[in-house]
Image (cartoon, rainbow, N blue to C red):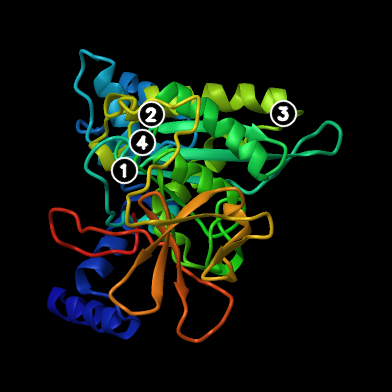
């Protein structure tokens, strides 16, 4: 068979099996050189990988990952940079590739944690976000731990992480007093609508805890009901807390839980780089408030035009020879009735804070409660909008 005819037959055979002629010739040459064993696939890995990270870099990356299994490539790279390594620190993409190569990261998980746009206050203590991280079991006595978390909005500094045995108002107040004595008073506290700082499903009105905070000069705002994204930073902090501690450690009792919380909070504030603040650690961006906690609650001073009344133990006050329901959370408090632009409608104020309205026009004996102010959002410098704080 001539060479031209043989070539035509080979090309016809390649077309029949749906492969290119170069591929067909490659397999024919392999068979001629090594027989049937040569037809098995061989590795395409190059004999040398000059661009691959050296063993020392890989070991350093894996060491940080083993110490903090929930940390990703950017945080690990920031830690290596801060350690002052003499050798060059690889890019975050290279660190990620090392983690994937050693089975430390499932590539599919990256799609679940895309970065989102956030709003942020302009200075420390302008806003704290406060919430409970659900509750976790304790392996002694059948009790449960309720982690109370307080996060500074600007710096992401964990102001408090407390192991509580319940979520009631006296417990929260006790811990808040301790936090206020240490870090001072914030300007505003953001919480959800559940007790003890809110009412279920966002019903209108205050609680004893929010009234106490107002008397301290701390403004209280609530997220939109059934919309946890308003407290985006607190929700993200809770996810980190679960990934790095709660999901990895069994807690025997409240005392041990608090020890674990204190140790983890130290790492979170002092060592863990945070992407939202340029891979710095929160402690470098936070400073305590200049507003000291007053050991004695100050009394509000009212002006000469205010009509001052005290709220009785049933939540009622007396005005114009009638009884008006205000709120049981305000029992014992002196409130002011102030005129509005509408005849027959008065604002009910606890100091400078409006806590309700009293409407005399319909002849009812109930004062309309004022809806708690929702969290005020302001866009980042790039002007983009989002539902996260």
Please tell me which of labels 2 and 3 falls first in the chain. Answer: 3
Disc 4: which residue:
98
Disc 2: which residue:
272
Who is closer to the viewer here, 9 or 50? Answer: 50
Q: How many marks?
A: 4
Residue at 19% x, 22% y: name it.
Answer: 88
Disc 3: which residue:
254
C-beta proximity under 8 Å, tags 2 and 1: no
Q: Nearer the viewer, mark 4 or mark 1?
A: 4
Q: CA distance from mark 4 to mark 2?
A: 20 Å
Within-10-Å neighbours for mark 2: few <14, some 14–19, many 20+ = many
Disc 1: which residue:
45
Q: Nearer the viewer, mark 4 or mark 2?
A: 2
Where is residue 173 shown, x and y percent of the image?
59, 37
On screen, residue 69 versus residue 2, left or right, reads right
Please tell me which of labels 4 and 2 falls first in the chain. Answer: 4
Where is residue 239 shown, x and y percent of the image?
50, 47
Please tell me which of labels 4 and 3 falls first in the chain. Answer: 4
- Secondary structure at badge 3 equals helix
On screen, residue 192 versus residue 125, left or right, reads right
Q: CA distance from mark 2 to mark 3?
A: 25 Å
- Secondary structure at badge 4 equals helix
Q: Residue furthest front?
A: 321
Please tell me which of labels 3 and 1 falls first in the chain. Answer: 1
Residue at 40% x, 70% y: name it.
Answer: 346
On screen, residue 241 versus residue 5, left or right, reads right
Classify the position of the N terminus by image quarter. bottom left
């Amino acid at each position: 068979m001539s060479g031209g005819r043989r070539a035509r037959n080979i090309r016809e055979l390649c077309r029949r099996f749906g492969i290119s002629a170069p591929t067909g010739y490659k397999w024919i040459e392999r068979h001629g050189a090594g027989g049937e064993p040569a037809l098995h696939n061989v590795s395409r890995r190059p004999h040398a990988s000059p661009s691959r990270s050296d063993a020392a870099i890989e070991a350093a990356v894996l060491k940080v990952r083993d110490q903090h299994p929930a940390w990703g490539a950017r945080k690990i790279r920031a830690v290596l940079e801060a350690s002052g390594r003499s050798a060059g620190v690889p890019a975050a993409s290279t660190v990620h590739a090392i983690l994937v190569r050693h089975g430390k990261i499932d590539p599919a998980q990256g799609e679940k944690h895309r970065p989102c746009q956030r709003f942020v206050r302009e200075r420390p203590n302008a806003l704290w976000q406060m919430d409970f991280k659900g509750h976790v079991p304790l392996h002694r006595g059948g009790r449960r731990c309720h982690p109370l978390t307080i996060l500074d909005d600007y710096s992401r500094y964990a102001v408090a992480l407390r192991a509580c045995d319940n979520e009631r108002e006296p417990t929260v107040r006790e811990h808040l007093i301790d936090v206020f004595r240490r870090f001072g008073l914030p300007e505003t506290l953001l919480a959800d609508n559940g007790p003890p700082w809110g009412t279920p499903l966002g019903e209108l009105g205050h609680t004893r805890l929010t009234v106490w905070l107002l008397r301290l000069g701390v403004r209280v705002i609530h997220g939109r009901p059934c919309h946890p994204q308003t407290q985006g930073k607190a929700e993200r902090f809770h996810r980190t807390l679960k990934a790095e501690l709660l999901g990895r450690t069994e807690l025997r009792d409240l005392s041990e839980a608090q020890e674990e919380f204190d140790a983890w909070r130290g790492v979170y504030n002092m060592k863990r780089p945070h992407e939202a603040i340029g891979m710095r650690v929160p402690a470098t961006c936070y400073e305590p408030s200049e507003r000291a906690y007053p050991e004695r609650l100050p009394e509000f001073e009212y002006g000469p035009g205010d009509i001052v009344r005290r709220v009785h133990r049933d939540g009622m006050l007396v005005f114009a020879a009638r009884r008006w329901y205000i709120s049981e959370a305000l029992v014992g408090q002196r409130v002011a009735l102030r005129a509005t632009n509408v005849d027959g409608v008065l604002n009910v104020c606890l100091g400078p804070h409006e806590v309700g309205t009293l409407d005399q026009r319909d002849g009812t004996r109930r004062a309309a409660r004022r809806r708690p102010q929702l969290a005020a959002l302001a866009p980042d410098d790039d002007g983009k909008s989002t539902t996260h704080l």
